[in-house]
Image (cartoon, helix red, strand yellow):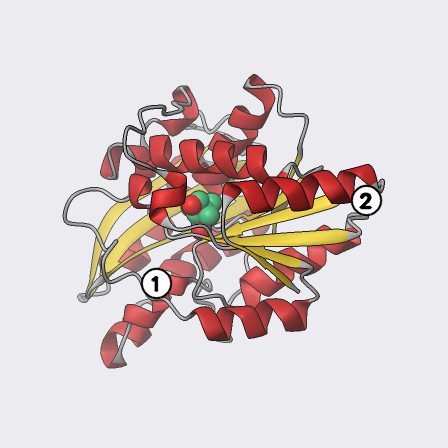
Amino acid sequence: MELLRTPEAMRAWADGRRAGGVRIGLVPTMGYLHEGHASLVRIAAARGCGKVVASIFVNPAQFGPGEDYEKYPRDEARDLATLRAAGTSAVYLPGVADMYPDGYQTYVEVGDVSQGLCGAARPGHFRGVATVVAKLFLAAKPHVAVFGEKDYQQLAVIRALARDLDFGIEIVGAPIVREEDGLAMSSRNAYLKGDDRIAARCLSRGLFRAKALFDGGERDAGKLVAAARKEIKAEPRAALNYAEGRDPVTLAPLSGEVAAVTILVAARVGPARLIDNVTLGT
Ligand code: PAF
């Protein structure tokens, strides 16, 4: 497994693989990897990528003032072991000064899908995500890039980015991987201790409740969302940020009778801001 620490090294690696006719898969991450990330590497390989490169970069541009950039968990040695075990060919680990050198001034803004939900709660977040992902695409030159569906709005933003800027990269969404008790895997789960870890189950519990209603025939988006919201609000350690029903593709707000809906939730539990979602009817 090769370690590449600069955009120049990443580009040279990608050019070499492309010259050899190899299909490149990219798995962008911020490190502190879990089984969900390992599944992304395997999914890229299963999509016919002869080489899979994972990036590890905690991107300061996507954290707002007062957010957890400084304390975001980091463990490079463990991450490299996880990636090696998952069959990763190369790891791109640029430094902040490599990505944003003095004088850096170019940012990418994606329109409607960046608005609302986490875009409203975290101003500038998706501008930072779109910018760094564009830079990762340009350095790693992948044919395929795989992102987890847990960050559902992020995935929609990246699909728009890849399409609108003609990257010619296939964007693949990968199913959420959950802990045994239903909690969606996330690097930020490391912040959850004791009662907060137990309380965090309320997000997935709410979504599973909505799914059970949908499976039982309920099609009213408002009622499905209300069921998820109720579970989260009933948990005293959780502060609900949002619970919304959106179109699974466009993320446009939905109400009334629906054939398909994605329910997205965000809540703070102790020190952690958690998100989760479920898509019903597709
Ligand atoms: O989902 C993440 O870990 C990050 O937002 C990403 C896509 C790697 C961009 O920094």
- CA separation in Å, label 2 and label 1: 34 Å
Helix, strand or loop at disc 1? helix
Of the pair 118 and 203, the residue shown nearer to us: 118
Q: How far from the left and from the top, in percent, is residue 261?
A: 51, 37
Q: Residues within 10 Å of mark 2 (few under 14, many from 20)?
A: some
* Circle 1 crowding by C-alpha within 10 Å: few under 14, some 14–19, many from 20: some
Tag shown at residue 188: 1
Q: Please state which of residues 227 and 269 is positioned toward the viewer in this rendering.
A: 269
Please identify the quadrant where the C terminus is shown. top right
Question: Residue 17 at what x, y percent from top left?
Answer: 76, 44
Q: Earlier in the sequence, mark 2 or mark 1?
A: 2
Snapshot quadrant of residue 12: top right
> Which three-letter amino acid code belongs to the residue tagged 1?
Arg
Name the residue furthest right: 21
Q: Is residue 151 visible?
A: no
Q: Is residue 268 left or right of residue 173?
A: left
What residue does disc 2 label? 22
Residue 121 place in picture, x, y as percent:
24, 39
- Above or below for 272 versus 127: below
| Number of the front mark, 2 or 1 | 2
- Across and down, in percent, residue 241 comes to 24, 46
Whether 52 is drawn above or below 183: the answer is above
Q: Is residue 195 above or below residue 91?
A: below
Residue at the limit of the structure toward the left, as seen here: 66
> Where 64 falls versus 273 (above or below)?
above
